[in-house]
Amino acid sequence: MASGLPSVTGDVLTSTTFNSLVLFTLNTQSASSYTVVLADVYQSLVIMSNASTKTLYIPTDATLPIASAPVGTAISIYNSGAGALTITATTPGTTTLVSAGATIGSPTLAQYKTAVAIKLAVNSWLITGAIA
């Protein structure tokens, strides 16, 4: 997460904080699965580098402090590994992922493709980008 984000009432925007707003923190994950955390929102790019098939999980608001991420929060995702990356909910019955024209499911990313998960409501995410 970029320095100074998220901000709270009373924070002062310094030149260091302002300049960091254009930088992404790179979070490279080499395992076959990864569950996003609060630090993955805002100016962060989750890079999935495992060469085999892998899964990125978006948790429910109740199981992780991602509930503090407001509607409109975005998680940027990049699949650098050779195997397909599936983006799915940790608890599909609670968390809904919508992609490809309001289709509910678990979209996939091929190698060198990116996607963004945008929080639409509590436990509801839109996955958009180079998904299959």
Image (cartoon, rainbow, N blue to C red):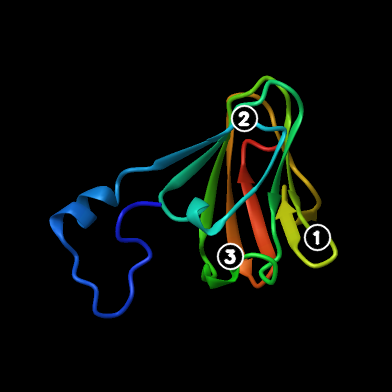
In-image side of 78 versus 3 (left or right): right
The numbered dot on residue 66 is 3
Of pointers 2 and 3, the one earlier in the residue sequence: 2
The numbered dot on residue 30 is 2
Q: Position of residue 51 (x, y in %)?
A: 68, 20
Comparing 90 with 102, the one in front is 90
In-image side of 93 versus 99 (left or right): right
Q: Residue furthest bottom?
A: 9
Residue at 32 percent of width and 43 percent of height: 23
Residue at 69 percent of width and 65 percent of height: 124
Q: CA distance from mark 2 to mark 1?
A: 23 Å
Residue placed under numbered mark 1 in the picture: 91
In the rendered view, tell whether residue 67 sits above or below residue 106.
below
Of pointers 1 and 3, the one earlier in the residue sequence: 3
Label 2 or label 3, whichever lies nearer to me, is 2
Q: CA distance from mark 2 to mark 3?
A: 22 Å
Q: Position of residue 115 (x, y in %)?
A: 59, 41
The image quadrant where one finds the C terminus is top right
Residue at 71 percent of width and 65 percent of height: 60
In the rendered view, tell whether residue 72 sits above or below residue 32.
below
- Residue type at mark 3 is Ile
- Residue type at mark 1 is Thr
Q: CA distance from mark 1 to mark 3?
A: 14 Å
Comparing 50 with 71, the one in front is 50
In-image side of 92 versus 42 (left or right): right
Mark 2, secondary structure of its residue? loop
Among the 4 quarters of the image, the one containing residue 71? bottom right
Of pointers 2 and 1, the one earlier in the residue sequence: 2
